[in-house]
Amino acid sequence: SILERDIAQFGTKQNIVIYVDGAQSVEKEHATKIRQAAREKARVNWEKSLSILQEKIHSGVRVRKRHFTDVKTNLAKTFYWSLPMRESFVDHITQAGWKVKICQTEADVSIAGDCQPGDIVVSADSDMLAYPSISLLWRPISNGLVLIYNISDVCQVLEVSRVQLTALAVVSDNDYGKNIRSLGPATNFSVIKSVEKPGMQP
């Protein structure tokens, strides 16, 4: 299937473990509300773009590519991978022979807890960079491309320690909280980078 093909580009059934989110954690309630609002906005925009497309077709007015694109883009933004959908995915992928771990809440937390030296984490979520146990992250982007983050190289380029990188992720805007009031990521980075502590080596 297309789904299995996409997974197989990163490894085999023998060396890959697929982690699936469980129920929503209380800590992510803020992020969940924001995403729900974004999906609702997308739904309204989808209805508007679909109405415009239908009107143009019925009136015989020329329909341009952007009219179809607007419908497709806004519809995609309304998608939510619900718990029943995740359960169906787990059933399908398990029957196909893949190793699957169903997490109690966030998959990120379970992945970080299980991650061992030499393991490669594949995730589109850059928040994974915050967990100290993760040393190598593959982040899939568009057109089948993958961004590779070697955490030691990231720390070296940014001239920060692993602890400082985690601290930056914690105080900056993320799924669990907003930026520190009146401060942005760039300011947070400057402040954390200026804090020198014994034993904190890049």
Image: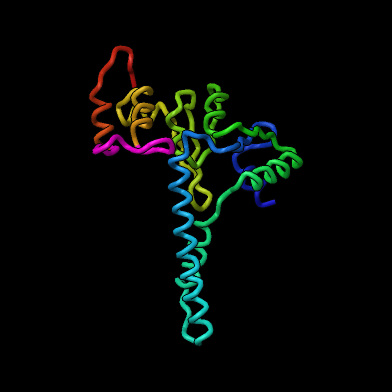
Q: Is residue 200 left or right of residue 13?
A: left
Q: Is residue 130 left or right of residue 195?
A: right
Percent position of residue 106, x then y? 54, 34
Percent position of residue 179, x then y? 32, 37
User: What range is drawn magenta here?
Assistant: 173-185
The residue drawn where x is 27% and y is 37% is 181
- In the rendered image, the quadrant that contains the C terminus is top left
Count of numbered labels shown in the rendering: 0
The residue drawn where x is 69% and y is 34% is 99
The residue drawn where x is 37% and y is 22% is 163
Magenta segment, prevailing SS (helix, strand or loop): loop
Q: Could you say which quadrant of the image residue 89 lies in?
A: top right
Up the image or down, 191 lies above or below 90; here it is above
Residue 101 colored in magenta in the image: no
Q: Could you say which quadrant of the image residue 151 lies in?
A: top left
The residue drawn where x is 67% and y is 37% is 12
Percent position of residue 160, x then y? 31, 25
The residue lying toward the viewer, choosing from 122 and 152, is 122
The residue lying toward the viewer, choosing from 166 and 6, is 166
Up the image or down, 139 lies above or below 65; here it is above
